[in-house]
Image (tube, rainbow, N blue to C red):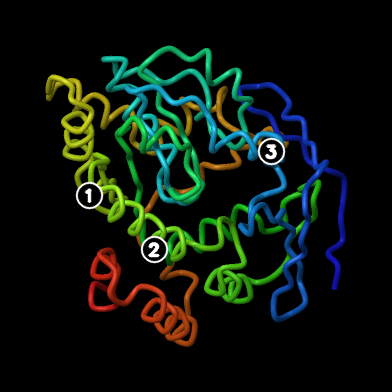
Amino acid sequence: MDEVKTEDGTFTVSGKKLQMDFSGQHMVKVTDRSGHTIHYQLFQGVHYTPMFKVEILQQIKGFNMREDDIYFSGYPRTGTNWTFEMASMLLNGRAETIQKAKDLMELTPHDELAQLPSPRIVNSHMKLSDSPDGVTALKCKVIYTMRDPKDVAVSLYKLYYNKPLSFGRYLGSFEDYLQLFLDGTVDSNGIFEHWRDAEKYFTDHPEIPVHFQNYEEAIKDPVRAVQALSDFLGLHRNDDLCRAIAEKCSFPRMKIDKEPYAIQLDGEHFLYRKGVVGDWKNWFNDQMLEDYYRVYEEKMAGSRFYATYARRKH
């Protein structure tokens, strides 16, 4: 069934209307097992939101990186906005809200990114194998975020469910969406492909310095998470600043402080939801958990990341 569309919602970034341009996109309609549809564009074999312009996606491999850039790649809904805020405050040396949205390179014109002062945090949700060639050529530092995929599935579902998107509403149940998530017919071909791609990338490029930001550990001890980021960035450790940043970046405060700058849909936060660990327990039934862990075993067995979210951890 084709979903009923209402009026298109309006996206704004830092208060400015985001102009959609679907020209040149290879649009695909993914259908869940109950017949509900969700729309993506297929770019070089990978599913992306149609919000990303083709002309920008085509420029990413050749993007002009700088030696002191920090390349920040993470699967959507793994705490990327939160981690960006922490890292940016550390680089600024102040526990003050970053007065702009995260400059996602799939969404931001690259001439704007070129004007940012060094050191830049170059943000992306793309798989690392699709990152700019300059990341490896210049041995740029890489931040990679990790989060329980079950919470990621819930968060992605809430991002799409019944939203007035100009490329169509998704009205399927979470159980139906979970099957798409496990099949990899979602953003970036799914989190498991994103992780296995990252694993291969770091194996092939051991010279690349990488910091793994684990969502659950950061929630448990946010001060330690900020300290670890500070050390990775090569900054002089200021524990008072780290504590202040951890407090400033607590989810309730950050959701309010970022209101004027965040991506919004019809005047409401589009990306900020709960910022908690374990919300998946409110969504998964026993059969869904069995389906999930069966696929997790298939996709992640033998991976360096496997043990972090293996079944015995819960």
Q: CA distance from mark 3 to mark 2?
A: 32 Å
Q: Which mark is residue 196?
A: 2
Pick whichever, 279 or 63, lies toward us.
63
- Residue 21 lies, with reference to residue 112, above or below; the image says below
Residue at x 33% of width, y 58% of height: 199
Pick whichever, 40 or 156, lies toward us.
40
| Residue type, numbered disc 2 | Arg
Residue picked out by circle 3: 265
Q: CA distance from mark 2 to mark 1?
A: 26 Å
Circle 3 residues within 10 Å: few <14, some 14–19, many ≥20:
many
Position of 45 compared to 273: left or right? Answer: right
| Residue type, numbered disc 1 | Lys
Circle 1 residues within 10 Å: few <14, some 14–19, many ≥20:
few
Residue at x 56% of width, y 36% of height: 60
Percent of width and height locating residue 282: 46, 69
Q: CA distance from mark 3 to mark 1?
A: 30 Å
Position of 106 compared to 287: left or right? Answer: right
Label whose residue precedes the other's in the sequence (3 or 2):
2
Image quarter of residue 56? top right
Residue at x 61% of width, y 57% of height: 46
Percent of width and height locating residue 24: 81, 44
Percent of width and height locating residue 186: 60, 62
Q: Which mark is residue 197?
A: none
Q: Which mark is residue 220?
A: 1
Q: Nearer the viewer, mark 2 or mark 1?
A: 2
Q: Are marks 3 and 1 in contact (CB under 8 Å)?
A: no
Q: Secondary structure at mark 3?
A: strand
Label whose residue precedes the other's in the sequence (3 or 1):
1
Image quarter of residue 234? top left
